[in-house]
Image: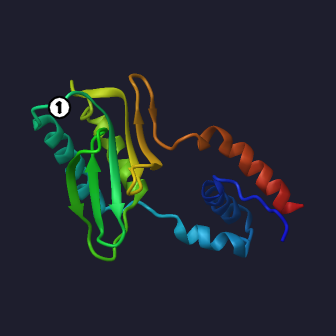
């Protein structure tokens, strides 16, 4: 078969395209429908649980006698057991949270919770080293998605796709409408 390359940020492009198509009465191509179904929205019932879990994880880190400075908070989500594990940057378990059965972890909700905690200056602690990141990992601690990034003067919430997204969307739509 031909080598059609799918851009890595296609879900973001698809989301923009949904807005554009409603405005212009355009029908979404069938190949984008699965991506549209995979896009998750903010889970309002999960947000308070995740906020408490992040607070408890950092409290547990602070209460350790050997605690130094924390630069990363790693989250591992076990799909089979619906458990979210929180680890420090030395891969020590800080906390674990059981999510409701049948409910999957929502990364947009995690981003929103982290942003709200930052706005309330929760991460302004002596033991939090900046740049500070909250990352989703696999069971081998390889980062699969960066959830939150905090530097002294910079907050990066969505990764590197935003600067290139408009250009990629324009190119995608040009190719689609040819």
Assign a secondary structure to mark 1: loop
Quadrant location of the N terminus?
bottom right
Q: Residue furthest front?
A: 140
Q: Residue at x 65, y 57 (%)?
A: 10
Q: Is residue 96 above or below residue 61?
A: below
Query: On the image, numbered disc 1 is attached to which residue?
Result: 67
Q: Which quadrant would residue 173 be assigned to in this image?
A: bottom right
Q: Position of residue 30 (x, y in %)?
A: 71, 75
Tally of numbered discs: 1
Q: Residue 13: give x, y in percent of width and height.
A: 66, 55
Task: Estimate how packed mark 1 is, as few (under 14), some (14 to 19) or many (20 or more) residues with alpha carbons within 10 Å.
Answer: few
Task: Using the image, determine if residue 43 lies above or below residue 31.
Answer: above
- Who's the residue at 17% across and 31% down the image? 67
Q: Residue at x 21, y 27 (%)?
A: 68
For this view, does 172 lie left or right of residue 101? Answer: right
Of 104 and 33, the residue lying toward us? 104
Q: Residue at x 84, y 57 (%)?
A: 175
Report the residue that reaches farthest toward the right. 178
Answer with the quarter of the image where residue 152 lies.
Answer: top left
Image x and y of residue 110, in percent = 36, 52
């Amino acid at each position: 078969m031909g080598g059609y390359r799918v851009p890595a940020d296609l879900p973001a492009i698809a989301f923009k395209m949904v807005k554009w198509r409603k405005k212009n009465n355009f029908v979404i191509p069938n190949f984008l429908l699965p991506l549209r179904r995979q896009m998750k929205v903010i889970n309002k019932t999960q947000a308070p649980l995740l906020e408490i879990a992040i607070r408890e994880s950092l409290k547990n880190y602070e209460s350790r006698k050997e605690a130094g400075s924390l630069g990363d908070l790693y989250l591992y989500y076990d799909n089979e057991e619906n458990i979210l594990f929180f680890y420090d940057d030395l891969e020590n378990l800080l906390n674990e949270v059981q999510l409701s059965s049948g409910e999957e972890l929502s990364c947009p909700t995690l981003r929103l919770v982290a942003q709200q905690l930052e706005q309330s200056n929760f991460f302004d602690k002596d033991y939090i080293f900046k740049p500070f990141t909250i990352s989703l990992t696999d069971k081998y601690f390889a980062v699969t998605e960066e959830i939150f990034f905090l530097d002294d003067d910079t907050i990066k919430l969505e990764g590197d796709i935003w600067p290139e997204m408009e250009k990629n969307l324009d190119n995608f739509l040009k190719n689609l409408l040819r």
